Amino acid sequence: MSETLFKRSDFSTKILEILDHVEYRRVESSEDMEQVERLRYKAYKAHDVLALAPKGLLDDSDFDSHAYIFGLYYYGELISTIRVHYVTPEHRLSQSGGAFPEAMDELLDSGLTLIDPARFAADPELTADLPWVPYLTLRPTIVAAAYFRADRVLQFVRPPHAAFYKRVFYADTVVPGRLAKNYGIDMTLMATNVIEVGRKLLTRYPFFISSASEQRMMFSRNPNDTLPPLTIIPTARFVPQGELGTDLPL
């Protein structure tokens, strides 16, 4: 998760170049879901955190109507995956809610809508020398915030990772590190106020920018739309400068 392998001034430019070789796939088929399950197992085993998935490597939340699972493909090979939940006052199922229900209810009772990512997994054999993987794996959370016009992007993480999210996503602490329900380890809940910091985030990291068409391909479930394409090409390099204001609810 370090930027130090690239010159800081060149970091975003480097990732924008990498986007030319990256594709996203929204996981809808059982075959793709099995591939995601295998990747989760491989990643969690390598990091000795299989015990943190008490409900199994696939659970009911993966099939929730507000859940979106993505695979990140680099030169055609699956290297990482993430699940993104769109959480609303009317639809409260989320990973973070299972651990910190009081904090989540407080956010939702105030009328906020939330993007809650979970199940981050990266192939340890393919990503060890790719420091940009966390950024592009988490990119759909920012695309989701733009598509759904969400108020916050959440980060439910272990305390040692909090500094990364504070630095990169300008995240604030919602729940300080403490023993999380159902996990048996310390976790912290953070949140990025995309309304306040959205423009700053997209300006600093332009690879998070997405076009309206990419947002629809990633997240639309309108029956009038076509089925999700096999692959989704990131559009950050093709969105004209000056249109940042259309990407997040600024």
Image (tube, rainbow, N blue to C red):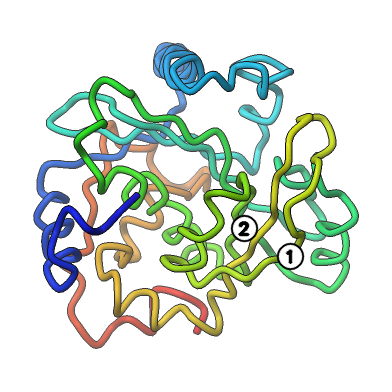
**For numbered disc 2, what is the local secondary structure?**
strand
* Tally of numbered discs: 2
Q: Quadrant of residue 31?
A: top left
| Kind of residue sitting beneath label 2 | Leu
Residue 7, percent from left and from top: 13, 65
Which residue is disc 1 drawn over? 174
Is 155 placed left or right of 22 in the picture?
right
In the displayed structure, 163 sits above or below 193; it is above
Looking at the picture, tell me which residue is in the foreground, 159 or 113: 159
* Residue located 55% across and 63% down the image: 148
Task: Tell me the crowding category of disc 2: few under 14, some 14 to 19, or many 20 or more residues within 10 angstroms, Cα based.
Answer: many
Residue 18, percent from left and from top: 13, 49
Q: Quadrant of residue 64?
A: top right
Is 168 placed left or right of 58 in the picture?
left
In the displayed structure, 18 sits above or below 55; it is below
Which badge, 1 or 2, comes first in the chain's sequence?
2
| Contact between labelled residues 2 and 1, with CB atoms less than 8 Å apart | yes
The span from disc 1 to disc 2 (Cα, nearest Å) is 9 Å
User: Residue lying furthest bottom in this view?
Assistant: 242
| Kind of residue sitting beneath label 1 | Val
* Residue located 80% across and 72% down the image: 111
Residue 224, percent from left and from top: 47, 47
Which residue is disc 2 drawn over? 154
Looking at the picture, tell me which residue is in the foreground, 1 or 68: 1
Looking at the picture, tell me which residue is in the foreground, 217 or 222: 217
Which label lies toward us, 1 or 2? 1
Checking the image for residue 40, the label placed there is: none
Looking at the picture, tell me which residue is in the foreground, 212 or 159: 159
